[in-house]
Amino acid sequence: MDYTTELFKLASREFLFLSAFRQKVRKGIRVDIDDAASDLEEIFREQAATARTDAKLEALYERARYPLVVLADEILLHTGWEFAPQWQDRIFEEKYFRSNVGGDQYFAIAKELRAEDVELAAIVFAGLALGFRGKYRERQEKLSEVRRNVYRLLSEYLATTGDKITPEAYHVQPGPPRRINPAVTLARVAIIGVGGLVLYYLVTFLLWGTLLSDIRTAARAMGVLG
């Protein structure tokens, strides 16, 4: 099982919510503070429930949970939302972790990432791509440095993902590895899936693919990918 993709799928609903939230705020659409809090709390509960279905995924989620929580606070506080001042008194980090140091700690987590932490690195990079700035809000050069460093941890995974959807596909096939056509894979999903399950996996697959593309594009712009 590709746990980098599984962890991303677990977090994808939050990423979609935060992206949609930011777009609504920018367009002047009112988002009620209680509705935003309720929706995100439901998402966090869903994440935890999904993680509990697999021991390794649960362990990975325990590490990713803090960055995911403080990412939500960051977007709610720094998107020009009318309720941002009130959110200062309701931040999720204080509710779930009894702390208020996310602007610093997010980057401490990024700094401590190792080559074997690709699953967490993908979550951290996604947060940066979605707009996490924290203590480096006014220091673009430091923010770019963090992005480059996290990307380097993802580079090997991104290279292998470009050639195959999951490692298991090659272990069960005799002969040399072959490149899998994403369109064929999606067609198979559509055939064997039903209703909302098909839609869910289609959306998360496309979202993950888009993130990989965005990561590569950002990396080229930073000069870390040829």
Image (spheres, rainbow, N blue to C red):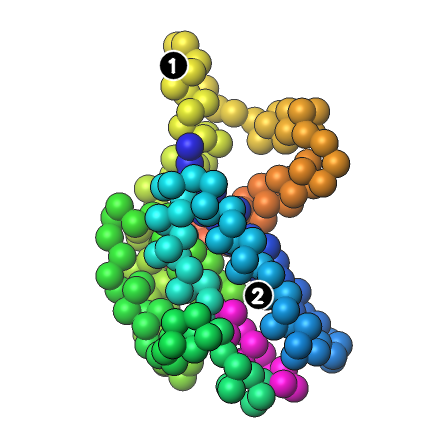
At x 59% / y 66%, what residue is drawn?
Answer: 40
What's the residue type where badge 1 is placed?
Pro
Above or below 3: residue 164: above
- Where residue 101 appears, x then y in whole percent? 35, 79
Q: Residues within 10 Å of mark 1 (few under 14, many from 20)?
A: few
Q: Residues within 10 Å of mark 2 (few under 14, many from 20)?
A: some
Question: Which of 166/217 is in front?
Answer: 166
- SS at circle 2: helix
- Where residue 133 appears, x then y in whole percent? 43, 75
Give the image quarter of residue 93: bottom left
At x 59% / y 55%, what residue is drawn?
Answer: 13
- Where residue 171 appears, x then y in whole percent? 38, 19
- Where residue 25 appears, x then y in whole percent? 68, 77
- Nearer the N terminus, badge 2 or badge 1? 2
Tell me the magenta residue range.
Answer: 71-83
Above or below 57: residue 160: above
Above or below 24: residue 51: above
> Does the rendering let one see residue 223?
no
Mark 2 and mark 1 residues within 8 Å of each other at the beta carbon: no
According to the picture, the residue beneath numbered tag 2 turns out to be: 41
According to the picture, the residue beneath numbered tag 1 turns out to be: 176
Disc 2 and disc 1: Cα gap in Å?
Answer: 46 Å
What's the residue type where badge 2 is placed?
Glu
Above or below 186: residue 115: below
Residue 82 included in the magenta stretch of the image: yes
